[in-house]
Amino acid sequence: MMEQDLRNMLEKTLEKLEVKDQAIEIEVPNDRSHGDFSTNIAMKLARVLRKAPLRIAEDIVALLPKNKAFKDIAIAPPGFINFYIDKAIYYSVISEINTQREMYGTSTIGSGEHYNIEFVSANPTGSLHIGHARGAAAGDSLARILKKAGYKVTKEFYVNDGGNQIHNLTLSINARYQALFNQSVDMPEDGYYGKEIIALAESIKASHGDRFVKEDGYRFFRQYGVDYLLARLKSDLLAFGVTFDIWFSEAKLYENNTVEATINTLKEKGFTYEKDGAVWLKTSDFNDEKDRVIIKSDGTYTYLTPDIAYHQEKLSRGYTKLIDILGGDHHGYVPRLQAATEMLTGKRGVLEVDLLQMVKVVRDGEELKMSKRSGKAITLVDLITEVGKDPIRYFFAMRSLNTHMELDLDLALKETNENPVFYAQYAHARIASVMRQASEKGIHVNTLIDHFDTFDSEKIDTLLTVLVDYKNVIEEAAQKRIPHKITQYIHRLAQALHSFYAEEKVLSDNERATKERLALLYAVKIVLKDALSLVGVDAKESM
């Protein structure tokens, strides 16, 4: 019996009192003598039902279905209902976890759903910056959580290799290459000056010599440049624990005539019109503030047009929902893209967009905007080099995407309980250390104990309560798309473990007590490792 289960019970009970749509507040009392859970719903209903809160509480308790999870249900003035859980029913969770291992907490709520999550999708023209890093952490963590909840998930990276940026990239590579042979070629107006472009040109020289001084190398430079920089992006993301199922090329939209076919579909459905020599899309009929141009008067496409075609291409693969994770500066772009998707599918809500807000990097209390190493924007590689993958993944997962956040590099490096990722990883390492000590003493850990005679402390009760809650947390995090719900759970579990460890002796002269506590710790270790994996963080065996 957990908080959500109790809320469901109370909702059904209130229906019997002809009370609907009433928010039910449930809290965990600081003083456990007031129960494991408590609600003030009777007091909130006093005006609605025109009765004294104590009388309403009595009516609610009388109508509650019998449940063996409750050892007692008590009413306390002025109208609180306090629920006392029979902890013995939680003991079976230990063998359940130890049997199912990493499958524990798996849900089926997403059964039949196939989500496509597109994230990062950076132009292959340079290194990934801190905004890309936050998007990468968010998208990957969300995908892991959704899979745990039973959803089928495809992670996708949209490679912007069909626009003007790639043309300028190609010209930049050519200029750098020609300079290696003392040829004077101007950089394009919007050229790329990163050191990776110089390295790229040097790589071409090493493998092809002066071949492209004598012949036009545009097509070669274009393809080589995209492939080279994409390989770097993939390598950086892999170091961050992020991989993709699909890398979709924008250029293929044109090669396969997807853009033209999508425009024709919109025309046939009657969602376009011509004005001032341009083709407009009737997005204002679908909650956009105004209609949008998709073909300019000179016959070229607007930025929106290939994006619509790309989403049509994704929809053709049979996904039940598309999720885009975009930068906060795309706020005004979302309604027009959702409008076009609704036109194509006839359904609202097929495309949902999560917007990332800015990240401020802080060291010694001061904001950092530039990398000391490169003198430019802080990159993903900078972050990994500075503090490692795990703190960055964890810190990003701790904050809701739509909130601005501060990334404190000093805190990320601290090996103290102030650092939340250290605190969580140390809990896992602590258990691993106890298991090693048990092994050294020749103690066999029987993980499948199903009868517990020596559990008699509040610290053990708290650990069990948190363990039982894991599946509910995963389902909520998946349905609401809030990865930070997982880090909150990790902190709760680590806190319960550290508190238990401070007061309970695990390896004692009492053989039965030792084995029961080892089985409990083994279960905690499994869940803690699994929860950390959902946000892309490694569980440490020693620290």
Image (spheres, helix red, strand yellow):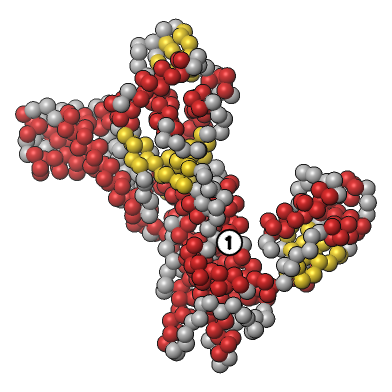
Q: Is residue 494 visible?
A: yes
Residue 420, percent from left and from top = 52, 62
Indicate whether 212 appears above or below 396. Answer: above
Depth check: 180 or 488 in front? 488
Residue 196 left/right relative to 181? right
- At 75% from the left edge and 65% from the top edge, which residue is drawn? 67
* Residue 82 position within the rendered picture, expressed as x and y whole percent measured from the top left: 80, 64
Q: Position of residue 355 (x, y in %)?
A: 51, 39
Q: Nearer the viewer, residue 448 or 441?
A: 448
Instruction: Sort mark 1 into few (<14), some (14-19) or many (20+) by Cα contacts within 10 Å.
Output: many
Q: Quadrant of residue 42?
A: bottom right
Which quarter shows the C terminus? bottom left
**Residue pictured at 59% horizontal, 77% vertical:** 450
Name the residue: 47% across, 64% down.
102
Q: Residue furthest top?
A: 276
Residue, far bottom: 509
What amino acid is at disc 1? Tyr
- Number of on-image labels: 1
Find disc 1 in the rendering and name its residue. Answer: 470
**Element class at badge 1:** helix
Residue 149 vertical position relative to residue 402 in the rendered view, above or below: below
Where in the figure is residue 46, as x and y percent of width and height? Answer: 89, 50
In the displayed structure, would residue 196 be above or below residue 187?
below
The one of 356 and 441 positioned closer to us in this rendering: 441
The residue lying at 19 percent from left, 43 percent from top is 199
Whether residue 484 can be seen here:
no
Q: In the rendered image, which quarter contains the N terminus?
A: bottom right
Whether residue 507 is situated above or below residue 315 in the rendered picture: below
